[in-house]
Amino acid sequence: ETGVTQSPTHLIKTRGQQVTLRCSSQSGHNTVSWYQQALGQGPQFIFQYYREEENGRGNFPPRFSGLQFPNYSSELNVNALELDDSALYLCASSFGGTVPYEQYFGPGTRLTVT
Amino acid sequence: GENVEQHPSTLSVQEGDSAVIKCTYSDSASNYFPWYKQELGKRPQLIIDIRSNVGEKKDQRIAVTLNKTAKHFSLHITETQPEDSAVYFCAASDQGAQKLVFGQGTRLTINP
């Protein structure tokens, strides 16, 4: 196991609600990236946090926001949930810098929006 | 931005045969290419990666090759076993931007 953990495992929300997902990075890692994986597709990059600062963002609207804490754990917040937000949300932990390092994924949070 | 195309989408091989999955990328600045294996209901697991200063890398039955000129890279699995059955994703990342851009995935089935 890689040591990256996520909570909760599953979540069911209603359209229009807000949700917070959590990720604990692997020991020694200072970077957390968040990805959305729709059924049958590859993960899509949402954003990345490096040393508590956002370090790159994918093509996701502002209602997707995040945070990284001094212990390098991270949160993903999604406001005004839409049905299309139903997906597996993965976080990946790595050691950041100017050279890409291996990213290790957590088990994911399965979000269902009804 | 970077775009990664992966082929084939499904692949079925006999146990013991080899499997090859191919990916192409669009951004010549990309310099890191990992491969992930995802079993049903599980997290993507990093199985091998290659950087742009290397042409080939092997780890037991798994190898990856990179052709920077043609902007494509491939995963080779030899002596396939039933436990190799999974969805495999290739990805690309450019220097200084650690986001990974993933291919669409290949569902590999190993037939006993």
Image (spheres, rainbow, N blue to C red):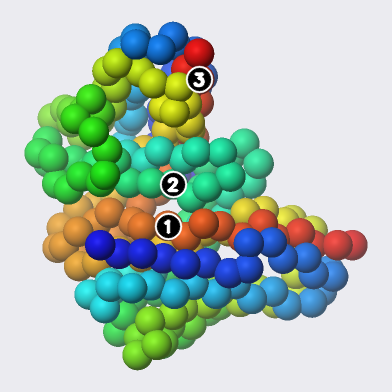
Q: In which quarter of the image is residue B63?
A: bottom right
Q: Which of the chains bears the disc numbered 2?
A: A
Does mark 1 fall on the same chain as mark 2? Answer: no
Find residue A112 and name its label.
Answer: 3
Q: Do the residues labelled 2 and 1 touch (CB within 8 Å)?
A: yes
Q: Are marks 3 and 1 in contact (CB under 8 Å)?
A: no
Q: In which quarter of the image is the N terminus of chain B?
A: bottom left
Residue A11 visible from this viewpoint: no
Residue B112 visible from this viewpoint: yes
Tag 2 secondary structure? loop
What amino acid type is highlighted by mark number 3? Thr
Is residue B27 or residue B41 the one in the foreground? Answer: B27
Residue carrying label 1: B102
Find residue B110 and name its label.
Answer: none
Q: In this view, does B18 lie above or below B3?
A: below
Q: Position of residue B96 (x, y in %)?
A: 16, 62
> Gap in Å between the C-alphas at discs 2 and 3?
17 Å
Residue carrying label 2: A43
What amino acid type is highlighted by mark number 2? Pro
